[in-house]
Image (cartoon, rainbow, N blue to C red):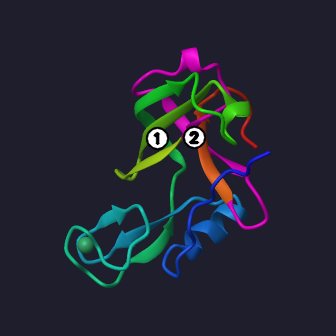
Amino acid sequence: MTVKPTPPVDAWSKPYWTAAQEHRLILQFCPDCQHHVFYPRLYCPHCDGERLAWVEASGRGVVYTFTVVRNNAPSAFSADLPFVIAVVRLAEGVQMMTNIVGCDPAEVYMEMPVEVVFEKLNEAITLPKFRPVNKDSKG
Ligand SMILES: [Zn+2]
């Protein structure tokens, strides 16, 4: 059985992955131009500011766009078919590539309200994913 690839953990993205292990979603925030920033970076992409700080995210957003993967070449992801790859626009204004879980892929639609859930991949990586709001109790 093949193993799923894991995201690289850089010095500047390590706080993000550590928070995810604790089931917290954090984003960078630039105090100079007041923009949230995702993915983790060394400098603000809006103003080149160097003072990016970590802040708690709401964990809420909407589906900006998505696709349902129903078939692909044999891989570590085969057991997950069908699954939803989506871009979620968080309330803070940034967008994240992620999966929509906790519902039938046929139920997903653009602008669907979603909230973060956390899926432990291994000892080092827990992935933030999103599920429909009000699908079931928060946990
Ligand atoms: Zn900035």
Quadrant containing the C terminus is: top right
Pick the residue in front: 67 or 51: 67
Q: Earlier in the sequence, mark 1 or mark 2?
A: 1
Would you place residue 33 above or below residue 121 in this image? Answer: below
Query: Where is mark 1, residue-wise?
Result: 61
Residue at the location (58% across, 23% down)? 71
Query: Where is mark 2, residue-wise?
Result: 115
Would you place residue 124 above or below residue 66 in this image? Answer: below
Q: Is mark 1 within 8 Å of ligand 1?
A: no
**Within 10 angstroms of label 1, few (less than 14), some, or many (20 or more) residues?**
many
Pick the residue in front: 64 or 60: 64
**Residue 22's spot in the image, x, y percent?**
72, 64
Q: Are marks 1 and 2 in contact (CB under 8 Å)?
A: yes
Rendered-image quarter of ligand 1: bottom left
Residue at the location (77% across, 59% down)? 122
**Residue 36's spot in the image, x, y percent?**
36, 63
Q: CA distance from mark 1 to mark 2?
A: 6 Å
Give SS at disc 1. Answer: strand
Membership of 98 in magenta stretch: no
